C-alpha cells in the first residue's frame, strides 16, 4: 500500500517496491513509476529495510552515496507506519 500512496504523487524519482510475494510483485508493475524487486521473506523491521536497500543496490536502482527514503507497513498488511531517511 505504501507504493500506491507514493506513486499517486507522481514523484520525480524512482519508486523501488520490494516484496517477497509473487502476486504483489506482478501487481506492482501496474503502479506508475514503480520498479519491483523480489526480496527474501524477513521477520523484523530492520531486516526488511536492510534487505530492501541491499536488493535495490544489487539490481542497480541506487548507487553508493545515494540518499533514499524508505516507507513500509510492518507487520505486513498494516498501513504505512515506517518512514526512514537513509544513505546507501
Image (tube, grey):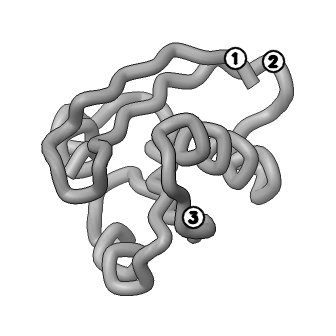
Residue 63, above or below 59:
above
Q: Are marks 2 and 3 in contact (CB under 8 Å)?
A: no
For this rendering, which residue is in front, 47 or 27? 47
Mark 1 vs mark 3, CA separation in Å? 19 Å
Is residue 53 positioned above or below 42 on the image? above
Give left or right: position of 30 versus 33.
left
Residue 1 position in % (x across, y down): 20, 52
Task: Give the structural element (helix, strand or loop) at label 1.
Answer: strand
Dot 2 or dot 3: first in sequence order is 3
Q: Position of residue 65 (x, y in %)?
A: 81, 18
Q: Are marks 1 and 2 in contact (CB under 8 Å)?
A: yes
Residues at marks 2 and 3, CA–CA distance in whole angstroms: 20 Å
Viewer-closest of 66 and 81 = 81
Count of all numbered marks drawn on residues in the image: 3
User: What residue is disc 3 on?
Assistant: 37
- Callout 2: 10 Å neighbours few (<14), some, many (20+)? few
Residue at 75% from the left image edge and 25% from the top image edge: 88
Q: Identify residue for label 1.
A: 87
Q: Quadrant of residue 81?
A: top left
N-terminal of the two: label 1 or label 3?
3
Q: Residues within 10 Å of mark 1 (few under 14, many from 20)?
A: few
Q: Residue at x 14, y 42 (%)?
A: 79
- Check the image and report above or below for 43 versus 26: above
**Residue at which label 2 appears:** 65
Amino acid at each position: 500500500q505504501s507504493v500506491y500512496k507514493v506513486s499517486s504523487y507522481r514523484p520525480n524519482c524512482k519508486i523501488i517496491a520490494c516484496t517477497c510475494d509473487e502476486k504483489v510483485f506482478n501487481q506492482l508493475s501496474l503502479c506508475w513509476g514503480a520498479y519491483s524487486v523480489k526480496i527474501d521473506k524477513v521477520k523484523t523491521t530492520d531486516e526488511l529495510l536492510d534487505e530492501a536497500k541491499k536488493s535495490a543496490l544489487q539490481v542497480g536502482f541506487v548507487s553508493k552515496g545515494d540518499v533514499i527514503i524508505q516507507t513500509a507497513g510492518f507487520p505486513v498488511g498494516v498501513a504505512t507506519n515506517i518512514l526512514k531517511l537513509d544513505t546507501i
